[in-house]
Amino acid sequence: MRFVRESMYKFIKDPGDIRIGEVIKRGWVSGDVGILGVPWDGAVGTRPGSRLAPARVRSWLYSSPYIFSNVSIVDLGDVDVVVGDHNETWRRVEETVSEALGLVRELIVIGGDSTSSYAAFRGLRKAVNDGLAYVLLDAHPDVRVITEGLTSGQVVRWIRSVDPNAYIAIIGVRTYSNAPYLFDEARKLGITVYTIDQVDSMGINAVVSEIVSNTNNRVVHLSINLDVVDPAFAPGVNSPSPGGFTSREVIRLVRELSIRLRPRVFDIVEVTPPFDVNDVTSMLASAIIVNAIWISKT
């Protein structure tokens, strides 16, 4: 007699403890929530390796308890990226995201570097066309002006060029980790920046309420670059910056924003497994994704 396990997602034989990996559907099919990976880090200027994040984050996500009520989750697979060709990769992400939004109510994109978020926004723009908002949690404003080369530090500048009328807000930026001119650039581009000190002064609830008011019923793309979290809680990121959110704070922030904004696209980027410690960053990314699923909570 062979002894074969039916589930690879749990070891304790508790039939009442259902894990996400046991109920998730796989393939290009419809559902409430879709999971799409973008294994790409071709624009990283510091610590590479975020191309490995979709697989690593999934491993923790699918071993997490299924806490939802009648929410169908679909793993749509990974975008077929092209190593060495960022434009073609971004085009493929754009096309895939646009098509995936016809299958699911909320699309969760696991990057990859933060250009995954830029390409995903292009896909949302293609599907919706107008009336968009891009809300980002990030330690950096990502509006660099460079003389040559490719860097993910320009992502928000590119998003502004995709949609000049979109409402854009960034939460958690560190003044001491960014060149001063970047804040001037953000103002010129009409981007609202909440520094980590401002969040401390206002409080998370006030920041969330203000952003909800300013989005004014727009279709929302909510993005989190995990460097917004303090490296004590998320060491495995591309560009760590001390003084960020705790795990508890960022989970709360994502949960509140997701419930109130109901994003069509949620992405998580810059998880960098080769620099992680005991998988704590991938575990946090998994917990954030679970809390970003708003469908059963509204």
Image: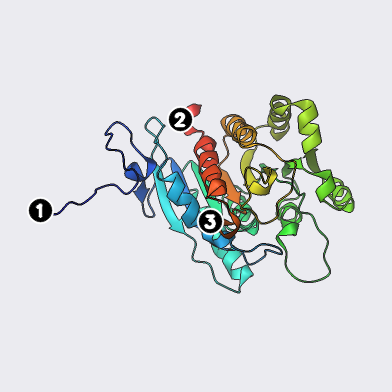
Assign a secondary structure to mark 1: loop
Disc 3: which residue: 53
Quarter of the figure with residue 12: top left
Assign a secondary structure to mark 3: helix
Circles 3 and 2, Cβ within 8 Å, touching? The answer is: no
Estimate the x, y position of residue 56 in percent, counting from the top left: 48, 54
Query: Dot 2, crowdedness within 10 Å: few (<14), some or many (≥20)?
Result: few
Disc 1: which residue: 1
Mark nearest the camera among 2 and 1 is 1
Query: Dot 3, crowdedness within 10 Å: few (<14), some or many (≥20)?
Result: many
The tally of labels here is 3
Residue drawn at point x = 57 percent, y = 44 percent: 266
Q: Give the side of residue 83 with respect to residue 206, left or right.
A: left
Circle 2: residue type: Ser
Circle 1: residue type: Met
Residue 100 lies, with reference to residue 131, above or below; the image says below
Q: Give the side of residue 215 with respect to residue 264, left or right.
A: right
- Distance, label 2 to label 1, CA atoms, is 42 Å
Residue 296 got which mark? 2
* Front-most of residues 102 and 63: 63
Residue 94 got which mark? none
Estimate the x, y position of residue 271 in percent, counting from the top left: 59, 53
Mark nearest the camera among 3 and 2 is 3
Instruction: Please say whether residue 123 is visible from this viewpoint.
Output: yes
Residue drawn at point x = 54 percent, y = 71 percent: 82
